[in-house]
Image (cartoon, rainbow, N blue to C red):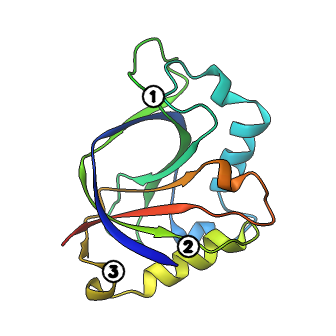
Amino acid sequence: MQKEQIQRPAIKLAGLSVRTNNKTESDPLQGKIFPCIKQYFHQNLAGQIANRAHPGTTFCAYTDYESDEHGDYTYLVGEEVESFDNISDTFTKITIPAQTYTKFTTEPGAMPDVIKNAWFEIWKMNPQKLGGKRTYQTDFEIYDERASDHTSIVLDIYIGVTP
């Protein structure tokens, strides 16, 4: 994976969310993320989000961490919005704080392996290799035009850090 440290401004997101943890997600029959993603795309919920900043670019955010990667967190699949005005209450709305991130760009790979392998690699990194200590505020993935072919996806993963 390619890695770089960058500053990002605050980002407003709207989408579907679930509360889960990595232990639950390790069991395909118990996981909550895949059904959330399936509902989001099969019901074309992105098209119902007002004020979309970049239609067609999907954000998957991990926020409201209970502790670290072992605790509960809120997962959101949605899009960046210009404002929360006129967005239905059926959608969860979050603001990702401005912060320093280590941005990882994956090599092309098939879903879901490309994302699982990237996270497994990130979880093994110590703060020095990661580029700082994780903040556990909000981490996120961006799926843009590079993710249109599910057999050869490239995506960016942003991990909030304190350098």
Graded by Cα atoms within 10 Å as few (under 14), some (14 to 19) or many (20 or more), the crowding at tag 3 reads many
Q: Nearer the viewer, mark 3 or mark 2?
A: 3
In-front residue for pair 14/67: 14
Query: At label 3, which amino acid type do we have?
Result: Leu
How many numbered marks does the figure carry? 3
Q: Nearer the viewer, mark 1 or mark 2?
A: 1
- Residue for point 42% across, 75% down: 3
Question: Which corner quadrant of the image does residue 146 belong to?
Answer: bottom right
Query: At label 1, which amino acid type do we have?
Result: Val
Q: Residue under circle 2?
A: 23
Q: Residue under circle 1?
A: 81
- Name the residue at the left extreme: 163
SS label for mark 1: loop
In-front residue for pair 41/69: 41
The mark that comes first in sequence, 1 or 3, is: 1
What is the spatial separation of the Cα atoms under label 1 and label 2, in whole angstroms?
31 Å
SS label for mark 3: helix
Question: Which corner quadrant of the image does residue 24 belong to?
Answer: bottom right
The percent coordinates of residue 143 (x first, y second) are 60, 51
What is the spatial separation of the Cα atoms under label 1 and label 3, in whole angstroms?
29 Å
- Residue for point 45% across, 28% down: 81
The percent coordinates of residue 70 (x first, y second) are 42, 74
